[in-house]
Image (cartoon, grey):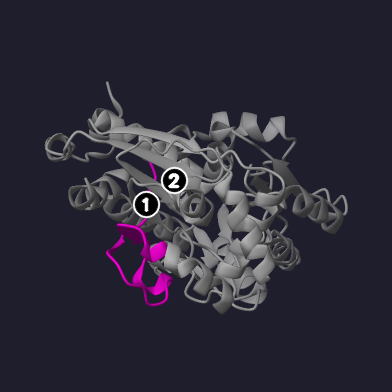
């Protein structure tokens, strides 16, 4: 049974029309380019889409730019400047980034390139193939200098994809809006029964006798794991509980190791705080989400927040920041609770721990909202319109 058939069986999502529509596309070769090969939501989505595109009959191949060192350091700094207007990058650093991108080795023999974010955009800027640029970030508040630097490269693409019209400044060109999605057939998105999840807790020596609050995501200051620890300390003052910060070190984010070490110092050996550096262990992540009492996503900047989608799909109650693409998923009081700072986050977590009926209702509503809007079949349909234009 292929993945589309599994989707039909698991979620009742039809695939026959999708198969027929993709069969009518011209025979063409698509190259999906990302900065890193694993550890981020972007690479996870790219890999999933690549698999389904091929299953639907579109020849697709996913590869990363295989960068390292100075390029990744500058890329991270530029990401911060694209997401925060007050984060500075010098003109010399932008030119250095452009020069390094020109030396990256990517296959440009495709009929079209699907370029994910600014590292791929610059790496393929001289390519003659048709170019689709997908920006996963909310760059509506980008630093002006950095925005003006990247704007011509973005407008040079044949198609530009953002998650939402709110995510960008004025641009010329063909612009589409496609929300990210999850694949419910993937290991990371299964609901793990309690008996199996308890074995994962035991492996990490996490107790199961107290409520568990969990945030999943790479160790990145934009995810504000430090703020989550402060939230936990406020919650624990009223209700005994355990905090799990579970994530990994994305191979395109050189700062993640530093952030992880900072968090260890902040936690200071607290026996109720568990920092788990988990790379490529999707079942364990799924188990931790499945057995948690509350999922938190207290990001300071967020593109879409696939960790939120994953938790909602498992029918878990979620507290998340009112930023980026999170409000597209969390309808406050209906599919989850939104927060704006440490204090409001702590109060929302306490509400869910003290009101089990509310937590269950939000979890059920969230799961149905994901079923209707953010499963991969919806994203595949939206991409079809882009491919019909480009290919």
Quarter of the image for residue 363 reads bottom left
Q: Which residue is mark 1?
A: 367
Classify 25 as above or below 309. Answer: above
Q: Is residue 52 visible?
A: yes
Question: Relative to residue 373, is residue 24 drawn left or right?
Answer: left
The residue shown at (29%, 55%) is: 373
Q: Are marks 1 and 2 in contact (CB under 8 Å)?
A: yes
Q: Which residue is mark 2?
A: 314
Q: Which residues are magenta?
A: 154-183
Q: Residue at x 42, y 60 (%)?
A: 362
Q: Is disc 2 surrounded by few (<14), some (14 to 19) or many (20+) residues within 10 Å?
A: many
Residue 125: image x %, image y %?
Answer: 45, 53
First in sequence, mark 1 or 2: give its number.
2
167 part of magenta stretch: yes
- State left or right for residue 322 relative to residue 263: left
**Can residue 76 be seen from the camera position used here?**
no
Query: Which secondary structure dominates the residues rendered in magenta?
Result: loop
Where residue 220 appears, as percent x and y from the top left, is: 67, 56
Circle 2 sits in a helix, a strand or a loop, which is it? Answer: loop
Of residues 252 and 67, which is closer to you in this image? 67
Q: Is residue 381 left or right of residue 371?
A: left
């Amino acid at each position: 049974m292929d993945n589309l058939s599994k989707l039909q069986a698991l979620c009742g999502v039809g695939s026959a029309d999708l198969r027929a529509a993709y069969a009518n596309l011209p025979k063409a070769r698509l190259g999906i380019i990302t900065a890193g090969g694993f550890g981020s939501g972007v690479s996870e989505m790219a890999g999933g889409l690549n698999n389904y595109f091929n299953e639907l009959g579109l020849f697709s191949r996913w590869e990363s730019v295989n960068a390292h060192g100075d390029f990744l350091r500058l890329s991270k700094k530029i990401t911060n400047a694209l997401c925060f207007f007050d984060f500075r990058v010098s003109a010399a650093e932008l030119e250095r980034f452009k020069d390094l991108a020109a030396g990256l080795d990517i296959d440009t023999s495709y009929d079209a390139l699907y370029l994910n974010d600014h590292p791929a955009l610059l790496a393929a800027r001289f390519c003659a193939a048709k170019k689709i640029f997908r920006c996963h970030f909310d760059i509506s508040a980008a630093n002006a200098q950095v925005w003006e630097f990247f704007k011509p490269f973005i407008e040079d693409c044949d198609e530009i994809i953002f998650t939402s019209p709110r995510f960008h400044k004025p641009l010329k060109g063909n612009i589409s809006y496609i929300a990210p999605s999850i694949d419910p057939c993937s290991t990371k998105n299964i609901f793990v029964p309690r008996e199996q999840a308890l074995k994962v807790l035991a492996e990490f020596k996490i107790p199961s006798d107290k409520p568990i609050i969990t945030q999943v995501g790479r160790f990145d200051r934009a995810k504000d794991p430090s703020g989550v620890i402060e939230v936990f300390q406020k919650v624990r003052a009223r209700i005994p509980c355990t905090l799990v910060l579970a994530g990994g070190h994305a191979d395109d984010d050189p700062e993640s190791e530093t952030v992880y070490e900072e968090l260890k110092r902040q936690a200071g050996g607290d026996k109720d705080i568990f920092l788990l550096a988990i790379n490529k262990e999707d079942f364990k992540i799924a188990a931790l989400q499945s057995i948690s009492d509350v999922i938190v996503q207290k990001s300071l900047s967020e593109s879409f927040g696939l960790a939120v989608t994953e938790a909602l799909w498992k029918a878990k109650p979620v507290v998340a920041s009112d930023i980026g693409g999170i409000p597209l998923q969390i309808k406050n009081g209906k599919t989850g609770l939104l927060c704006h700072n440490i204090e409001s986050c702590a109060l929302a977590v306490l509400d869910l721990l003290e009101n089990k009926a509310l937590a269950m209702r939000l979890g059920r509503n969230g799961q149905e909202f994901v079923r209707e809007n953010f499963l991969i079949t919806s994203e595949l349909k939206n991409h079809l319109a882009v491919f019909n234009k480009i290919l």
